[in-house]
Each structure stands twice: as structure tokens, then as C-alpha cells.
Image: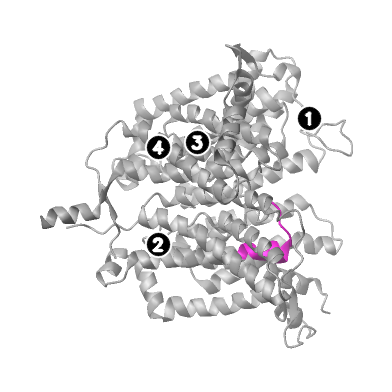
Amino acid sequence: MRSPLRLERRLEQPKWLNWAIPLFSLVAALILGAIVLRLTGKNPVDVYQRIFERGFAGKRVFSDSLVSATPLAFTGLCAAVAFRMGLINVGGEGQLYMGSLGATWVGITFDDVPTGLMIVLMAAAGMLCGGLYAGIVGLLRARFGTNEIITSLMMNYLAGILLTYLVYNSFSYWRDPVSGNFPSPRAITQRAEWNTYTVFGVDLPIAFVMAIAMGFAVWFLYKRTRFGFEVGVIADSPKAARYAGIRTSSTIILVMGLSGAMAGLGGAADVGNFRRYMDPKGLELSGYGYTGIVVAALARLNPVAAVFVALLMGGLNNAGYSLRGPDFPSGLVGTLQGLILFTAVAGEILIKYRIRSNSRRSEVVTA
Amino acid sequence: MNSNIFIIIISSAIFYGTPLFFAALGGIFTERSGVLNLGVEGTMLIGAVAGAWGSQHVGGSSWMTITMAIVIGMAAGGLLSTLLAFLCITLKVNQTVAGLAVTIFAGAVGLSSYFAKIWGVSESPVTRQIRKFDVLGLADTPIVGPILFNQNILTYLSWVLCVTSSIYLFRSRFGLHLRAVGESPATADAMGINVARYRYLHTIFGGALAGVGGVFYSLAIVPNWVDGMTAGAGWIAIALVIFGFWRPSLTLLGAYLFGALQSLGSTLKARNVSVNGDLLNALPFFMTIVVLVLVSSRFAHRRLGAPAALGIPYEREER
């Protein structure tokens, strides 16, 4: 049996595919989602319309979506930074938790520092904690060749357990001392709250501006520096990189650390701009780290694009929260995001191959 | 004597290890064919929710209901893996990302949770459970009784599967072909083996086994539906495949080791031994990392059984 279609390798890759394919993937995911909704007895048009209204339409709604989008921009960068070198860091979730832990510590401890400096300190603490936590994974990979996918994932669970322990099952620094038998997390000082600006009636958190800056910084690092070039060589061929004298091991650790630092900064942003405390349950429900993978894949690992794709996913998440109820089950948003990842990864093949019909070819041959 | 703490630990290690073994055995079949399935966690959850639904909706005798629930769980796992197989084998996409997509799509906040809500699985308790039963009346035998003769049907089935799949993999023509496909698909293709067919069948069967692992959670361990109830078991199963050097027998031992770690908390708590619960919860995840580091050291590398073509799509050279 021959399949009616076959894949033929492209000799060159047209530039317009770079934006056409993600767009195509998104549309395809919406169509597949509509099929799932239809099969489960829902009206897809109605569902999509409500997602649009609650996720994207209007200044108020868009401000809320920015809140959901900001950590996703950072976890998207986290995934993009590592995936570009072929390092599958799926530990963005745990690295974000650790960033939240570090930033909260700073936010509670320093109470006589001006807000501007405070933001820098919290961001630095978040990046450091996330980066070091991911660095462990990088070290194990570089030193022993341990599969980074599983270790980074296991460390998500470990970070989650650590945060739960600190807030709910111990009398740690992160637990509110006045919350007696009903443990709750301890809030950062008022001075440690990050700024939010109002631009055209939309609340723009400073962390989102940081995310855009980081997106460009990563783009510059990967496209315009020697380090970025070396990362590219390792991604294409680790063997060639070693022959060329590139220090593969230390690059792996550095890239992992940078990737984790992005997620850690997301954790700091989550505390500073929005939550104001380290919230194990809230973070776990949000699943920023996993959605970050979807963001990076749809952005085709382009760091600048990732920040803007995060807006899309953030809107979807936000709509999911505000619509959650008996006729909008919470699993729906995750399902849609999974479908987007499916179509994004399937779309990648259109960059490398073109689809040709088998029958037409045989006709030509016989003619 | 029969309530000796060590006997309880061993017998619950087998109980908790069984779903890990089912999922890991599925992983062995899938990976031996050269396909990497990182969607095990999501596949287990889909199996779990489908099995729970089946136990609530299929009537008849208890045995009938349980059998049908397991079959439905298998079918759901197999169906989800068909999607993965299509992406990885026919479309030749990046297998790592495709697997992650399966887990995000079907995972704790994805399709499994959605199905649970719209089918009302989480609203009513699971009434028909997979219960332990006394085989040949030997459960009261000292020491071996509670360990070997007081388990549930899926545990017995897993022992049968462990033996038959070892024979299949290493003593049968199909197993030989399968390993050839995983090691060197081009050679297998030249031998006239249909690479795509082998990969499809084993990926789907692997997913079906992961589905059984999920059913074990929703009908035996918990037993009920809770969003994200497998809590990382799928990922531990993927690590177990590596830990067991892609061999069913070693993987069975590994699964029981991790089963022991998972069950330690509840066993000790029942015995009023006070231990830090968070520390116990962290233990399986921490040990997974330790074990992975150990098997990836150079010493172990020599005897690793990793299929050479694992994760690489097969493309027949044209002309």
C-alpha cells in the first residue's frame, strides 16, 4: 500500500515560512480543538468567542492577560534558550519556583531599600536561584551525560515539594508567622512591589518590559556573539564542535544556567509584580513552565517572538481562569495548548519538506 | 508474623510498583522499535480516566466490569499513542517535542481533566475496584503468602507479561526483527522488514500498556479519579526503562524498588512511625536522578542496551 502523499526535502527554505507556519499551526490547532469540542457536545464557535472576549478583548481584560503572559514570556525564553542548543530543559517549572523562592527572600528581608534597587535585587536573586538550580542539571549532563529531560523534570517535583514544605509544613522564613494553624505564605514588604505603568489604559507590568528586553538580549547573544555562534555549532554537530576546540561541557552548563535564570526571573516577576508572596499551590496550578514549552515551540525558538507568543498563551490562560466553571472545564485550556504544540511540531516539517502527491508523480512518469 | 513490617513493605512495593512496570514495559516495546515516547505521563492519565469511566458505566458482574475497564483504559492509551506514532513515524517530527506535546495535551490540566469533568468521572466514586484476591488459598502462608499470593489480577498479569515479553524480545523472530528496527532501520528495511509497521504496532501497544498502568491508579491505588493522579509516575517509568537496560526482567526489579519508595510513606504512617512526609514524597524523584546518574556513568555505558536508532526518524534513501 502506498500512501497518497509523500514528503520531499526542500532544497532551500523560503523566509516567509517563518511566520506563515506558526500561523498555519495555530489555525490548525483551533480546527482540531473545534473537532474535540464538537465531539464532546460543545459549540466551538461559542467557546472560542468567549475565550476571545475574556482573553483579549478590551483594555481591562488585556491587562489581566498581561499578568498571565509575563511569567510565560520568561518560561518561553527559558525553553527557547536551551532548545536552541538541543538541550531539552523541561525544568522551567521548578526553576521558576526556585526564582520565586529567592526573590521572596530578598523581598521580605530588605525593607529599607528604594524600590528601583529592590527590583534589581529581586530579579538578580530570582535569576541566580533559577540558574543554579538548572545548573545542576547542566552539570550532570556535561559531567556524566545524564539525560537532561528526565532530571530536569524530576527537579520540578522536588522544587514543588520544597516550596510546599517551606510554606505549609514547617515554620520557615517564607511562612507568615502570624498565620497560626492555617499556614499561609509571607508577603514581601510594600516597598518591594514592582511598578506597573499605565499605557493607553492598559496596565503594563515592568516585568513584561523586562521580558521584551531579555528577548532582545538573548537574540543578540545567539545571533551576534562568539558564544552564540558556538552554541549554534554544538546544536548542529557536537562532534564538529569538539574538533573545532569549542568547550562543549562548559557551554552546556552555561546554557542550562542561562535558561534556568530566565525561568527564575519569571518567578521573581510573579512575586514582585503580581502575587507578592511565594505561593506553591498557585504556581502549581498555573503550570507556567510547561506552557513555556508551547510558547517556545510556536515561536520557533525565536526569543523575541517568544515574548509575543506568550501574550497569546497568557490570554488563553486568563480566559481559562475567568471562565472556569461547569461548562468550561479547567482541562480545556491545557487541551488547546497541547493541540497547539502538536500542530507547531508538525508544522516544523513543512520547513524541511514539501508535501507532494504520489499519484501525480506517477502520472508524470507514465506520460 | 504476616504483619511484619518488612513483609508489608515488600508486598506494597509490588503493589505500587505494578503500574510503574506496566508503563515501563510499554516504554521498552516503544523504545526498542526506535521511537522515544515522552508522553507516558499523559497516556497513563488518559488510561486512568478512561478506566474509571468504564468501571462506572459498564454493567454486569464485577469481573466483567473490571475487565472492560482495563480494556477501555488500554484502548484509550493506544489511541493516544497512535497520534504520537503518526507524528513520529509518518510525519517524522522531533520525537522529544511530540512526546512532551502528548503529556501537555493529555496531562493533569489537559484532556484527562477535561474528560473527567464532562463525563462526571470525578463526581461519583469508583465503586468497582480491582481488589486483591487470595490465590489458591495461599495468602496465609507465612512470609511468601502476603507477598506473592495476595495481590490483584493486574499484578499477576504483569508477571506473566514479564516472562512472555522477555521471550518475545529475545527468543522470537518478531523480537529479533523489532530489535533490528530499533538498532538499524536501514538494515531491517533491506531485510524486508516493514519498519513503519513495526514502529506503529509497538508504539501503540506501548501506549496501551501505559494505559493499563493508569487504570491501576484509578481503580486500585487511589482508587478514584483525581486530576493529575499519577503525579510523575510516567516520568519515573521512562527512567526505569533506562535503569532496566531495556530489559523486562531488570525493569521489573527497578519498578519494585521505586514502588517501595512510593509506598514507604503510607506504610510507615500506618505503623505510627513518624517521618517527614515531604521528605518521603521527594524520595522517588530524588532517587530517579541518582539512579540515572549512576547508569549514565562510563562503567554502565558498556552494558547499556539503548537501541542505536532511538529517537531518530527513519527515512529511506531515495535513489
Name the residue beneath numbered marker 1. Answer: A186
Q: Nearer the viewer, mark 1 or mark 2?
A: 2
Q: Which residues are magenta?
A: B213-228
Residue that mark 3 sits on: A295
User: Any mark on residue A84, and which?
Assistant: none
* Residue most extreme to the left: A367
Q: Residue at x 46, y 55 (%)?
A: B84
Q: Nearer the viewer, residue B295 or A44?
A: A44
Q: Which residue is mark 2?
A: B34
> Which percent across, then down, holds residue A269?
62, 26
Which comes sooner in the sequence, label 1 or label 4? 4
Asked whether the residues under marks 1 and 2 belong to the same chain, the reply is: no
Q: Classify residue A40 as left or right of residue A2.
A: right
Q: Position of residue B1 (x, y in %)?
A: 84, 79
Q: Are the residues flagged by discs 2 and 4 from a single subunit?
A: no
Dot label at residue A24 = 4
Frontmost of labels 3 and 4 is 4
